[in-house]
Image (cartoon, rainbow, N blue to C red):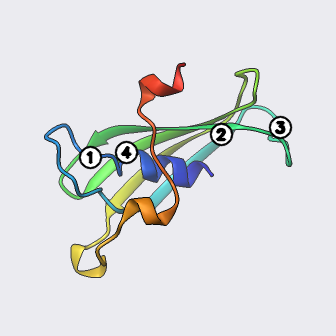
Amino acid sequence: MLDEAAGRSLMISDTAGAQNPRFMFTARLDIRYRNNVPVGKSLRLVGKAGKSKARTAQAEAFIFDPSGTLLAQAEALLMDVPEALLPAYDLENLGWKLYPEERLEQ
């Protein structure tokens, strides 16, 4: 879950309004478990894009319980998937959506 949240945080269009998401693979993932992560319970997963370079980027991801307690966190180093390997994706048909940070605070 942390890997997915970190990677997907970089798939949002850039500030220039580009419509193509940035598809990346994980080169390194460092996880810190702060508390037990329960199975079969509701969790809140948050991904946050970090520094971005031409072919690499950093991101963080967090798992919280319903009360807001931090259960686990990760720091990721991601690398661009070469464009030649990517088919044209229709994100809406993939069945998931990214929510801007301000929406999460509501």
Q: In the figure, 48 relative to 82: above or below?
A: above
Question: What residue is shown with label 3?
Answer: 36
On the question of residue 8 being in view, the answer is: yes
Q: CA distance from mark 1 to mark 4?
A: 16 Å
The image shows residue 54 at horizontal and vertical percentages of: 18, 54
Task: Give the mark, 1 or 4, whose residue is nearer the N terminus.
Answer: 1
Q: Horizontally, is 58 left or right of 43 in the view?
A: left
Residue linked to disc 1: 13
| Type of amino acid under label 3 | Asn
Q: CA distance from mark 2 to mark 3?
A: 11 Å
Residue 106 x, y percent position in the rendering? 54, 19
| SS for callout 4 | strand
Q: Please tell me which residue lies in front, 88 or 4.
A: 88
Looking at the rendered structure, the secondary structure element under dot 1 is loop
Upstream in sequence: badge 4 or badge 2: 2
**Residue marked by disc 2:** 32
- Near mark 4 (Cα within 10 A), the count class, few <14, some 14-19 or many ≥20, is many
Question: Is there CB contact under 8 Å for labels 3 and 4?
Answer: no
Categorize mark 3 by other alpha carbons within 10 Å: few (<14), some (14-19), many (20+): few
Q: Secondary structure at mark 2?
A: strand
What residue did someone put label 4 on? 58
Mark in front: 2 vs 3: 3
Q: Earlier in the sequence, mark 3 or mark 4?
A: 3
| x and y, in percent, of residue 96 in the image | 51, 55
Residue 26 shows in this picture = no
Name the residue located 54 percent from the left edge and 54 percent from the top edge: 4
Q: Amino acid at mark 1?
A: Ser
Q: Quadrant of residue 32?
A: top right
Do tag 3 and tag 1 residues touch (Cβ < 8 Å)? no
Of circles 1 and 4, the one toward us is 1
